[in-house]
Image: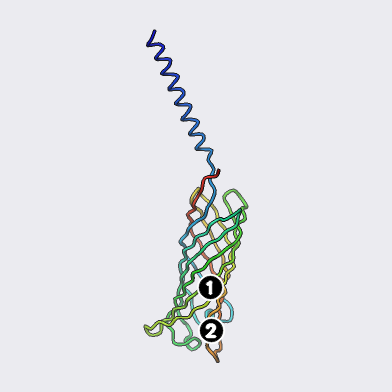
Amino acid sequence: MLSIRLSIVFCLVLNSCLFSQNDTREGEEAVEFYDVGFISISPYYPIAIGDNFASKAQNTNLGAQLESRFVIADHILIGARLNIFSGQVTKPELVGNYDLRNVNLIGIEAGYRIPTLKNFNLSFLAGIGAIEYRNDVDGEIFEDTGEAYSLMADADYKFSRHFSAFLTAEYRYESLNTKAPNSTVAFNKASYIALSFGIRFYFLNERD
């Protein structure tokens, strides 16, 4: 008789534990997460446009970009980025006896994200940054500095909880401190249309 009672108690306890585990599992599955921000490393391809030294006297090469953005309020984004690319001088008679230009930018950006579908977002941003042109002349390096101003449109598709594929189109205007009197091309400005694309890693937080 005692063994039967113990068996019944054991079954009740076991059953209670199993239900408790199921409730916990269901509770875990019900947890929602939201995007905190992302980090990405991607190709960066600038195309020089306009009437200036970049479009008239150099070819640009594929570069790279490191970027991070964070959501600070409903759909409001802030971020920072670093990108680099190089270019070969094609007309030294216009810009001087340069062999190679390396262009570095470090900047900040802010914008607004528009959620269109469940996993698809559009973002529009403006950015500002410091730029540096490192010009190679027979092994010697000469530097030009300035500011860059950017307008960006960004499409982002999340294919998993932490990863997304993206494409960004950018208009970039540069104002340089270079002074070159009596030149037939503008040395103190440059304009680019730039594309970047790749994979982003998202940071998530648990929704209360």
Q: Name the secondary structure under disc 1.
A: strand
Residue at 44% from the left image edge and 87% from the top image edge: 97
Image quarter hosting the N terminus: top left
Q: Amino acid at mark 2?
A: Phe
Nearest the eye: 11 or 167: 11
- Location of residue 144 in the rendering, given as x and y in whole percent from the top left corner: 48, 80
Nearest the eye: 27 or 154: 27
Residue at 55% from the left image edge and 86% from the top image edge: 185
- Location of residue 42 in the rendering, given as x and y in whole percent from the top left corner: 47, 62
Q: Which of the labelled discs sits on residue 187, or is there none? A: 2
Residue neighbourhood size for the residue with mark 2, other residues' Cα within 10 Å, grouped as few (<14), some (14–19), many (≥20): many
Judged from this view, the residue extending furthest toward the bottom is: 182
Image quarter hosting the C terminus: top right
**Residue 69 higher or lower than 9, as above or below:** below
Q: Which of the labelled discs sits on residue 97, or is there none? A: none
- Location of residue 29 in the rendering, given as x and y in whole percent from the top left corner: 51, 38
- Location of residue 18 in the rendering, given as x and y in whole percent from the top left corner: 45, 26
Q: Amino acid at mark 1?
A: Ile
**Residue 10 higher or lower than 137, as above or below:** above
Q: CA distance from mark 2 to mark 1?
A: 17 Å
**Residue 154 higher or lower than 28, as above or below:** below
**Residue 186 higher or lower than 14, as above or below:** below
Q: Name the secondary structure under disc 2.
A: loop
Q: Earlier in the sequence, mark 2 or mark 1?
A: 1
Residue at 48% from the left image edge and 75% from the top image edge: 60
Residue at 59% from the left image edge and 68% from the top image edge: 151
Count all numbered tags in the image, as a single digit.
2
Task: Give the colour scheme of this rendering.
Answer: rainbow
Residue neighbourhood size for the residue with mark 1, other residues' Cα within 10 Å, grouped as few (<14), some (14–19), many (≥20): some
Name the residue beneath numbered marker 1: 47
Nearest the eye: 208 or 38: 208
Which is in the foreground here, disc 2 or disc 1? Answer: 2
